[in-house]
């Protein structure tokens, strides 16, 4: 019956006329239509608290153009970005070479995320990353972020060793997903999200005795450490990382090198751990500037034996996976970013930039009582303030810290932005450190722009009473009022 009906039907090759096609979204027109509405939209739909915070400290700028180390706001004002999106834009924003590669790739109609295949581009990017490691790391897993990379490292470590405990450092920052948060050393991020993963224990950074004491307990799967701590820009003592890796090997634990912020040449080496000589990490985690800032991507590199413990059979060949892992667009961006890093010799440039800024800032320390210490490793730079010897300034210092322990560094970053159009950040909660993560493409003129501006800010900070102090006092009072609500 069905066959007879089919035979009686007539078919035509004529196509059904398409419906009238709607115009493609005009993203430029949309941006222009809503220009300047950033904070209103965020207050309504995204994060009202953050919107209020940025407005309170005068950071509520609306940026509409970006190129290299520069941003421009709706008024056409040019800014020097010394934060580079928390380190994402190591190559600067909208690098033309990476953009060209991505435009060419998009024109190719190349497939992505087929899943039932072994993607070509992820194999090529993995090969390139392995070439740049200081030791033999055999296998690569691609992630969407640094936090996801840390989660991967935790899983790998527990599976490979059969042990439960993860050791991390006080003041550490490894991300804000749940496993990463469990080994986060900053209570301001942890509060309200307890309980955390069990068997996560914190030790002091640079304390080898404390590390060995924990390792001797015999239950440690891994020691996860930043080779330069991002919160506060704390540097390792000479030999600390090398000896920590040796102790981990001695006690059957993995040494996990979290290079999410410090990697990709930022410190003047491809990995910051290389500054400590012959260090042999078991796992390295990369992210941030791996794609040149165009698309989220991270990578976890590990030794072959670890990989074989995790992916131990064909049945376990996808036991750890992620939907967007190995996306072709992200892999192409990673290959382009590595190419730019090499061709423009940006790792060497990072060291030069860091040395110039470091020496310029250190020269100011004898002249300005609030300036306590400068810590720099390439383009990771921390500027720490401290209580001065002047009785008048000491009284001002005490007053600011009574209002809010996180308040004082705002007296530097607010005028840097408002008067000098330079973007920086406070390096963490309750620490008096301003942090710089400049792009690896800033010029000598940009360095002079920053150093001249920062010294002018210091001059104003050392005038008490004065306009700089009035602004900070007002912010402190607003913070106290908001807490009382």
Image (cartoon, rainbow, N blue to C red):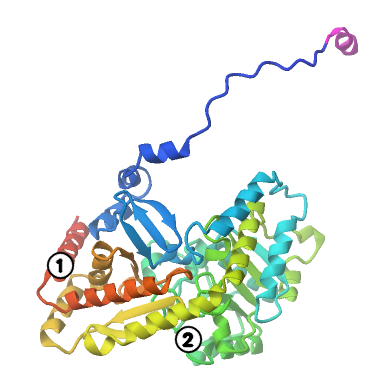
Q: Residue at x 19, y 63 (%)?
A: 475
Please give left or right for residue 76 compared with residue 223 in the image.
left
Give the quadrant of the N terminus. top right
Query: Where residue 107 appears, x then y in whole percent?
Result: 66, 45
Magenta span contains residue 5: yes
Front residue of 250 and 329? 329
Q: Secondary structure at mark 2?
A: loop
Q: Which residues are magenta?
A: 1-10
Name the residue at 73% across, 50% down: 115
Q: Which residue is mark 2?
A: 236
Secondary structure of the magenta portion, mostly? Answer: helix
Q: Is residue 29 magenta?
A: no
Is residue 84 placed above or below 10 in the rendered structure?
A: below
Please report contact status of discs 2 and 1: CB closer than 8 Å, yes or no: no
Disc 2/disc 1 C-alpha distance (Å): 35 Å
Q: Is residue 382 visible?
A: yes
Coordinates of residue 307 in the picture (x, y in percent): 72, 70
* Residue 204 falls left or right of residue 335: left
Q: Position of residue 326 (x, y in %)?
A: 67, 56
Residue in view at x 64 percent, y 19 percent: 18
- Tell whether 359 sits left or right of 476: right
Which labelled disc corresponds to residue 143? none
Residue 473 numbered tag: 1
Quarter occupied by residue 286: bottom right
Closer to the camera, 377 or 147?
377
Query: Is residue 194 at all visible to an observer of this figure?
Result: no
| Residue 70 falls left or right of residue 272 | left
Which residue does the image show at 38% across and 57% down from the upper left?
71
Q: Secondary structure at mark 1?
A: helix
- Vertical position of residue 129 compared to residue 106: above or below: below
Whether residue 413 is situated above or below residue 14 in the rendered picture: below
Q: Is residue 329 above or below residue 393?
A: above
């Amino acid at each position: 019956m069905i066959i007879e009906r089919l035979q009686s039907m007539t078919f035509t090759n004529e196509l059904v006329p398409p419906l009238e096609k709607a115009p493609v979204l005009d993203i430029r027109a949309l941006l222009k239509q809503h220009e300047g509405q950033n904070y209103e939209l965020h207050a309504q739909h995204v994060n009202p608290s953050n919107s209020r915070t940025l407005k309170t400290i005068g950071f509520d700028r609306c940026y509409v153009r970006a190129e290299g180390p520069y941003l421009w706001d709706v008024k056409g004002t040019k800014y020097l970005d010394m934060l580079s999106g928390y380190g994402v834009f190591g190559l600067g924003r909208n690098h033309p070479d990476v953009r060209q590669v991505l435009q060419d790739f998009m024109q190719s109609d190349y497939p992505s995320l087929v899943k039932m295949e072994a993607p070509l581009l992820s194999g090529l990017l993995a090969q390139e990353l392995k070439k740049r490691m200081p030791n033999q790391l055999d296998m690569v897993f691609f992630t969407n972020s640094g936090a996801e990379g840390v989660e991967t490292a935790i899983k790998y470590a527990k599976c490979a060793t059969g042990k439960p405990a993860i050791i991390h450092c006080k003041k550490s920052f490894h991300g804000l997903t749940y496993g990463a948060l469990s080994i986060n050393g900053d209570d301001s991020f942890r509060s309200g999200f307890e309980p955390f993963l069990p068997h996560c224990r914190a030790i002091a950074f640079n304390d080898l005795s404390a590390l060995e004491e924990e390792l001797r307990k015999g239950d440690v799967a891994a020691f996860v450490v930043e080779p330069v701590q991002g919160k506060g820009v704390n540097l390792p003592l000479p030999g600390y990382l090398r000896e920590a890796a040796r102790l981990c090997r001695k006690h059957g634990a993995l040494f996990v090198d979290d290079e999410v912020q410090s990697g990709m040449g930022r410190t003047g080496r491809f990995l910051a751990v290389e500054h400590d000589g012959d260090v042999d990490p078991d796992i390295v985690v990369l992210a941030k500037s791996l794609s040149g800032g165009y698309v989220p991507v991270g990578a976890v590199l590990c030794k072959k034996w670890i990989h074989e413990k995790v992916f131990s059979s064909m049945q376990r060949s996808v036991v750890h996976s992620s939907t967007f892992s190995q996306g072709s667009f992200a892999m192409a961006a990673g290959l382009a970013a590595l190419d730019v890093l090499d061709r423009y010799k940006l790792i060497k440039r990072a060291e030069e930039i860091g040395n110039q800024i470091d020496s310029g800032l250190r020269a100011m320390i004898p002249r300005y009582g609030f300036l306590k210490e400068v810590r720099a490793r390439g383009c990771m730079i921390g500027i720490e303030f401290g209580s001065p010897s002047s009785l008048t300034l000491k009284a001002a210092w005490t007053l600011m810290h009574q209002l809010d322990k996180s308040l004082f560094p705002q007296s530097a970053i607010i005028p840097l932005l408002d008067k000098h159009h330079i973007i920086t950040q406070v390096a963490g909660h309750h620490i008096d450190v301003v942090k710089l993560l400049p792009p690896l493409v800033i010029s000598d003129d940009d360095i002079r722009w920053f150093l001249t501006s920062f010294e002018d800010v210091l001059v104003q900070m050392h005038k008490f009473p004065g306009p700089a102090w009035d602004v900070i006092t007002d912010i402190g009072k607003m913070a106290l009022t908001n807490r009382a609500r």
